[in-house]
Amino acid sequence: MRLLMFLGLMLASVSANAEPVSYADTVEKLLPSVVSVSAVKADGETPDMVKALRGSPFEQFFNEHYRDGSFDAQKSILLGSGFVYDDKGHILTSAHVVEALDNVRVTLNDGSVISAKVAGRDAKTDIALLKADNPQDLKPVKIGDSDKVRIGDAVLAIGNPFGLGNTVTSGIVSARSRDIQVGPYDDFIQTDAAINRGNSGGPLFNVKGELVGVNTAIFSPSGGSVGIAFAAPSKMVKAIADSLIKDGAVRRGRLGLKVQSVSPELAKTLKLPKAYGAYVSEVENPKTTVKKGDVVVSFNGREVPSMRDLPKMAAFAPVGSTARLGIVRNGQKLTAPIVMMELKDAPKPVRLAETEDSFPIPLLGVAGTELTPEIRQKNGISKSVSGILVTKVAPQSDAAHKGIKAGDVIVELDKKPVKSADAVAQWAAETAEMGLDTVFVLIDRGGERFFVVVKFTAAED
């Protein structure tokens, strides 16, 4: 009991002597930069957030504040948050807030309303750019460096939850680089700051008042805040915004390298200290010293933890700029420059057409056929692709476990090109003489190439 009393006295003393934490001065400077976004949607479909207000104490408030967008109106109001990006009248919000819209209304912190046009959207990162018709007296935010955000840092979220107007919540950074499977460039900052419907597109600030993220999504079984929210990092947001301002669309960079994951088996084969980086299976960029078989382990000084991280890093590098790749070649670490190319739409996947000319490849547990002009035409395979078309994969084979499937083209076996049944038979004979039990297979799938290490198995009858 005495120990408990002593601890209680200590806590009381600390509480009495310590100054209370307050963000009031910081928030006062930030509020003029944060806006609410609303727009009339002509299809009459009521947003989920508006439905959630029915029967609540906020229903009357909503109807009075947005008379032309009330629950009984034929047109509905979309509500979200945003912030002033620059002194030229550019405002950022979430793409889903202004989806399929051209004109929106922006409400400032002082209650004044200005009109704006949607100047660009990027659905893959859920970022939209607005251009205010009258940009006078708009106060832009200060962009911070999201790469410097650390787990445990205090953050402030300001937004427009449930149409209430600017609301401030605080929390900490709970995690970084979250992939929540909503897009190809997921790299979210996770925070426990209270974020609800209507906060989408609102800013996430550090305690210095610098923008470090844009609130995008929440994890919530109930639809309300449960302390798990996600914000797009400011570094990515800035790249998207600048591209939208300059080109009206997002021009993403790409390396012009076809890469694959480095599995523990592949890392052992390549004599890497651990399974990390991205294995280069093909080089199509003429402006680089990277070679097929290299492993990319860093991008502009940042380590590449896995193959999936490399395209994300490249996507936000300016097209035409020169990036520095750290590579491992034959166990030696080197630096290789590369000029960034522009990312285009991904090729359509190959659809396999049935063929009666298949032959077994027993060591792999697959069956295949040669690429005749007729087979190419039926399956949409480019003339530039040479190899054996996979027509069947034994379900219990290691090839199936490694992801090889019908419609893939086997380009190489143990780094030797295979273009015919005879070439495959010769490879099988040489392999049997050497007593090997695995094979290094280069696969082409719809124009994308990758290597897999496959253990030998018997094909099913």
Image (cartoon, rainbow, N blue to C red):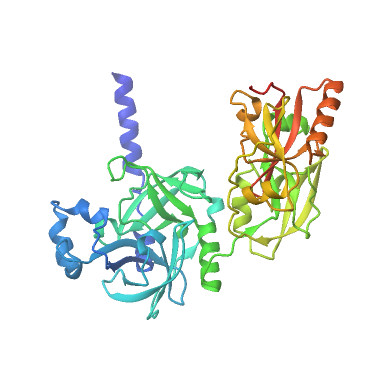
- Vertical relation: 271 (above or below) 461: below
269 or 91, which lies in front?
269
User: In the rendered image, is residue 274 in sight?
Assistant: no
Counting the numbered discs, the total is 0
Q: Indicate the position of residue 167 as horizontal and vertical percent values.
A: 29, 57
Q: Indicate the position of residue 5 as horizontal and vertical percent values.
A: 29, 25
237 or 271, which lies in front?
271
Image quadrant containing the N terminus: top left
- Vertical relation: 142 (above or below) 232: below
Image quadrant containing the C terminus: top right
Q: Indicate the position of residue 44 as horizontal and vertical percent values.
A: 23, 63
Q: Indicate the position of residue 131 as horizontal and vertical percent values.
A: 42, 74
User: In the rendered image, is residue 134 in sight?
Assistant: yes
Q: Is residue 2 left or right of residue 143?
A: left
Q: Is residue 272 left or right of residue 150?
A: right
> Residue 445's image quarter?
top right
- Vertical relation: 32 (above or below) 307: below
At a point 26% along the width and 54% down the height, the residue shown is 49
Specify the farthest residue to the front. 356
> Residue 134's image quarter?
bottom left
Q: Is residue 247 left or right of residue 112?
A: right
At a point 49% along the width and 43% down the height, the residue shown is 178
203 or 142, which lies in front?
203
> Residue 91's image quarter?
bottom left
- Vertical relation: 353 (above or below) 213: above
337 or 436, which lies in front?
436
At a point 51% along the width and 66% down the height, the residue shown is 241
